[in-house]
Image (tube, rainbow, N blue to C red):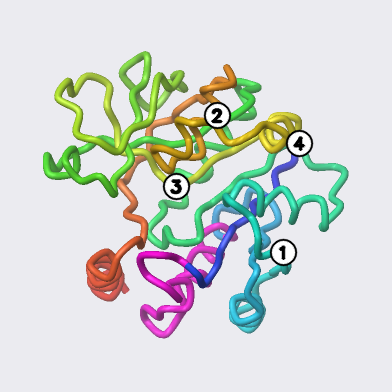
Amino acid sequence: MKTLILIPSRLAATRLPGKPLLKINGLSIISHVFKKAEEANIGEVVVATEDQEIAEDVKKNGGQAILTNNNHKTGTDRIFEALKKLNKMDIDLVMNLQGDEPLMNVEDIKNLNTQMVNNKSKLGTLGSIIKDQKLYKNQNVVKVITKETLDESKFSEAEGFFRKTLSDNKNIYHHLGIYCYQIETLRTLISLKQSKNEIKNRLEQLRALDNNIKIKVALAKTSSIGVDTKEDFVAIKKIMEYKF
């Protein structure tokens, strides 16, 4: 099966404007993300953006980028437009990797792809074990509840996604910003209206669950933090500068 990795990215983030081009170790966040995606070596990688500056930065750093419309409500809409523009007819799976997750583990990207292929799943994502209790209370951290306890071999069904504090800690994981879709599932998802749940919780994956599209969850080795706020950026910068 053939996979295409698409990375949606835009400068106009509400909480931290301009974040894709913030630099860590001399390289922009978006360029760190596409390099991680390329390292996974599971298929072609393209950044989908509405901003010329992001496209130029990605190309300057050796990546591919495609310009998309600036009126998309979600990242899923953006990657679907990119998919149509790229006109790749031989693709089976599309991976949507968030452009603000520079700490995403390459092995986790590979594992999600493998699970999708082996299980012939329609839609999959990743969850990691929550080691810090503070994350349960942090509403910037999205949690996923799965039917079964995850281990390395499981690809369990998601029962729900939440931002709010959850008291029952059974089968609750930190949801990571990555999705893998069969092409037909992506097409279906895009044709559906945003659900009330999705709008209320600002979680586009709820559109799938609200329309009875199952989402499978694989266990991630590491807990990647997305860059949503200035504090996130400072924390990630520290980790990455220490690592390299």
- Of tags 3 and 1, the one toward the viewer is 1
Tell me which segment is drawn in magenta: 13-38
In percent of width and height, residue 82 lies at: 74, 56
- Looking at marks 4 and 2 on the same chain, the residue that comes earlier in the sequence is marked by 4
Judged from the image, the secondary structure of the residue bearing numbered disc 2 is helix
- Of tags 2 and 1, the one toward the viewer is 1
Please state which amino acid type lies under the numbered disc 2.
Gln
Judging by the rendered image, the residue that carries numbered circle 4 is 92
Please state which amino acid type lies under the numbered disc 4.
Asp
Judging by the rendered image, the residue that carries numbered circle 1 is 68
Judging by the rendered image, the residue that carries numbered circle 3 is 177
- In this rendering, would 107 be left or right of 52? left
Judged from the image, the secondary structure of the residue bearing numbered disc 3 is strand
For the point 55% across and 29% down, the residue is 115
Q: Residues within 10 Å of mark 2 (few under 14, many from 20)?
A: many
Please state which amino acid type lies under the numbered disc 1.
Thr
Quarter occupied by residue 201: top left
| Residue extending furthest toward the top | 147
Judging by the rendered image, the residue that carries numbered circle 2 is 115
Q: Is residue 34 above or below residue 194?
A: below
The image quadrant where one finds the C terminus is bottom left
